[in-house]
Amino acid sequence: MDKIIDFKYKGKRYVLKESNLAEIEGVRLDKWGRTILLINKNLSPYKRNLALHRLITGRGLRTLQNKKSYMADSMSNMCPSV
């Protein structure tokens, strides 16, 4: 069973969990007054520390759009009109 770590950093509450996240390093979600961090468990210790720092600080992260507009943008890029 994977452990879940609950901690505070600079006055904010975080919940950290390692999961098998296919090809991404990590995910950050802000829910219920806490920041939930999911990190890929297959990363090397060095990359894991870099990913954790980026997720905590919020620097250098990509924002996902809602699913419908993201899919529409992806399809328009894959199938441009002639």
Image (spheres, grey):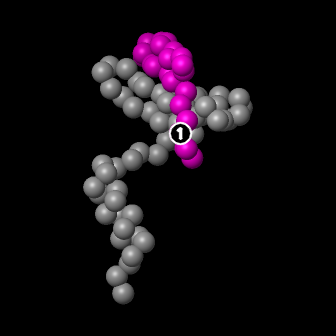
Q: Can see residue 59?
A: no
- Residue 31: where, in percent of width, then height? 33, 26
The kind of secondary structure element at disc 1 is loop
Q: Is residue 45 above or below residue 5?
A: below
- How crowded pointer 1 is (Cα within 10 Å; few <14, some 14-19, many 20+) is rated as some
* Apparent side of residue 45 relative to residue 31 in the rendered image (left or right): right
Q: Residue at x 43, y 25 (%)?
A: 36
Q: Residue at x 34, y 56 (%)?
A: 70
Q: Which residue is mark 1?
A: 21
- Residue 2: where, in percent of width, then height? 54, 21
Residue type, label 1? Leu
* Magenta stretch: includes residue 29: no
* Apparent side of residue 2 relative to residue 14 in the rendered image (left or right): right
Residue 71: quadrant of the picture: bottom left
Residue 40: quadrant of the picture: top right
- Is residue 32 or residue 53 the one in the foreground? 32
Q: Is residue 66 above or below residue 55?
A: below
- Residue 5: where, in percent of width, then height? 51, 15
* Apparent side of residue 49 relative to residue 22 in the rendered image (left or right): right
- Residue 4: where, in percent of width, then height? 50, 17
Q: Is residue 54 above or below residue 24?
A: above
Q: Residue at x 53, y 31 (%)?
A: 19
Q: Residue at x 45, y 19 (%)?
A: 14
Q: Which residues are magenta?
A: 1-24
